[in-house]
Amino acid sequence: MTRTILIIEDETDILNLIEWHLRAEKYTVLTASDGLKGLDTAIRQLPDLIVLDLMLPGMDGLEICKTLKRNPKTEHIPVIMLTAKGEEVDRIVGLELGADDYMVKPFSPRELTLRVRAVLKRTDISPAEEKSIQYQNLRMDLDSHRVWVGENEIVLTVTEFKLLIELIQNRGRVRTRDQLLDRVWGYQFDGYARTVDTHVRRLRQKLGEEHADAVETVRGIGYRFREN
Ligand code: CA
């Protein structure tokens, strides 16, 4: 089945470059160079993924992302946000608004293609159907709440277990501290970000040398489980 990807980008050179690379990977590609047209195309065509530039004429990327995530027809469509260097704050906001990943310009089109593939693969799996998770020699059984590294079982608290699931199911993708608090602890308040750091530290210790650095720190934002 071919997947359809919508690119919303006003810089023609970048748009053409991404389009070329995605077509080479056999994706069906739709394009828009203006925010409003892009949003309209997204709603009418319901693509499988959207590559969305942040600064756009008509309507900017954040507004588009917000609108898509508020619409039940489009809320499930994953978004990869493109930002220029120095748009640090917007980058974080972008993730909080529900973008699934982001890339900072200039980026390699090949890297973007890999991210597209990873995001599509991730959204293919329905978490409800997943009974176990395997990452290299790390194995999680979701029914019995048990975790093994190779032959050795590691004992995690319920919170650590949930944290690991959330990170590993979203591997390759940054989770902000707020997202983690919301998903793992079920609440979001200012000042609790440290709680996440403490649990991540303990989780790394328990995972042992082999996997400790699979949980990467994304400075100023949150954490990401390494893809692979
Ligand atoms: Ca732009």
Image (cartoon, rainbow, N blue to C red):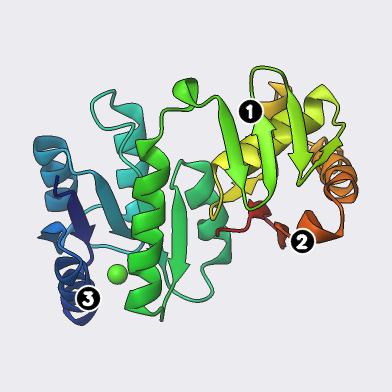
Give coordinates of residue 12: x percent, y percent: 16, 77
- Is residue 188 shown to the viewer in this render? no
Q: Name the residue under label 3.
A: 11
Q: Mark 2 points at which residue?
A: 213
Q: Name the residue under label 1.
A: 183
Which one is closest to the eye, mark 3 or mark 2? 2
Q: Give, as a three-letter code, the residue at label 1.
A: Arg
Say which element carries label 3: loop
Which class describes the residues within 10 Å of circle 2: few (<14), some (14-19), or many (20+)? Answer: some
Does 169 sit above or below residue 204?
above
Mark 3 in CB contact with mark 1 (< 8 angstroms): no
Q: Mark 3 vs mark 1: which is more N-terminal?
A: 3
Q: Distance between the residues labelled 2 and 1?
A: 22 Å
Mark 2 in CB contact with mark 1 (< 8 angstroms): no
Q: Distance between the residues labelled 3 and 2?
A: 37 Å
- Is residue 166 shown to the viewer in this render? yes
Give coordinates of residue 104: x percent, y percent: 46, 72
Does 165 sit above or below residue 211?
above
Q: Mark 2 vs mark 1: which is more N-terminal?
A: 1
Of 57 and 109, nearer the camera is: 109
Which class describes the residues within 10 Å of circle 3: few (<14), some (14-19), or many (20+)? Answer: few
- Which picture quadrant has residue 116? bottom left
Q: Give, as a three-letter code, the residue at label 2.
A: Asp
- The quarter of the image that holds ligand 1 is bottom left
